[in-house]
Amino acid sequence: MKREERIKSYRATIESNENDCKLRFRDAEGRLAEATQRLTELQNYRSEYERGLGNRVAGGMSGPALLDYHAFIARLGEAIRQQQEIVTRCELEREQQRGRLRDAAVQVRTVAAVVERWRTEDRGSESRREQREIDERAQISFQRAGARA
């Protein structure tokens, strides 16, 4: 059994692991994109509310309504802070997945290089074996020709 065939199962395992890492990385990127989009929406919503505050005050707003308005903007600020934490966690997760994917890819490339080196060595061994057989047959033919003469 050739060395390449002995490592076939291991190679399939690490290639499968690399594919899994690709999927997990894409999932992490998707979660980050969603979290970032949600953060942007919250920030835009708060900006709209803050801009609207001036118009409402100019139009005559009661004290309790103003307090409620400020409380709502404060709750939006807290939601934004929490969403920023989520974005940060998603960024960290994506970077961890990127590292795992990079490690898996290195492992696949390393095994592929070993397999290719083995193929090259096997081809060289096979060529030398064939050349020995040819030389032996030539030697036998030469000895038979010399015996007849």
Image (spheres, rainbow, N blue to C red):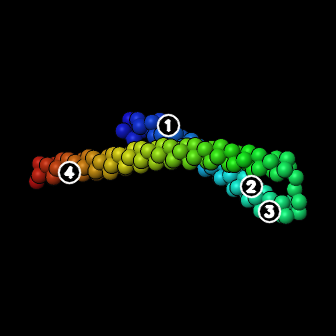
- Which label sits on residue 54? 3
Quadrant of the image occupied by residue 21:
top right
Task: Indicate the secondary structure of the residue bearing disc 4.
Answer: helix
The amino acid type, in three-letter code, at marker 2 is: Arg
Q: CA distance from mark 2 to mark 1?
A: 49 Å
- Residue located beneath label 1 in the image: 13
The amino acid type, in three-letter code, at marker 1 is: Thr
Q: How far across and how far down the image is residue 133, in percent?
A: 25, 47
Q: How far across and how far down the image is residue 92, in percent?
A: 53, 45
Return the disc, 4 or 1, that comes first in the chain's sequence. Answer: 1
Q: CA distance from mark 3 to mark 1?
A: 62 Å
- Which label sits on residue 46? 2
Return the disc, 3 or 1, that comes first in the chain's sequence. Answer: 1
Callouts 3 and 1 close, C-beta under 8 Å: no
Task: Indicate the secondary structure of the residue bearing disc 1.
Answer: helix
Mark closer to the observer (4, 1): 1
Residue in view at x 35 percent, y 46 percent: 114
Along the viewing direction, whichever of 103 and 39 lies nearer the viewer: 39
Task: Indicate the secondary structure of the residue bearing disc 3.
Answer: helix
Residue in view at x 51 percent, y 47 percent: 95
Q: CA distance from mark 4 to mark 2?
A: 87 Å
- Which label sits on residue 74? none
Return the disc, 3 or 4, that comes first in the chain's sequence. Answer: 3
Q: Residues within 10 Å of mark 4 (few under 14, many from 20)?
A: few
Q: Report the quarter where the N terminus lies.
A: top left
Q: CA distance from mark 3 to mark 2?
A: 13 Å
Is residue 31 in sight in this rendering? no
Callouts 4 and 2 close, C-beta under 8 Å: no
- Residue located beneath label 4 in the image: 135
Mark closer to the observer (4, 2): 2
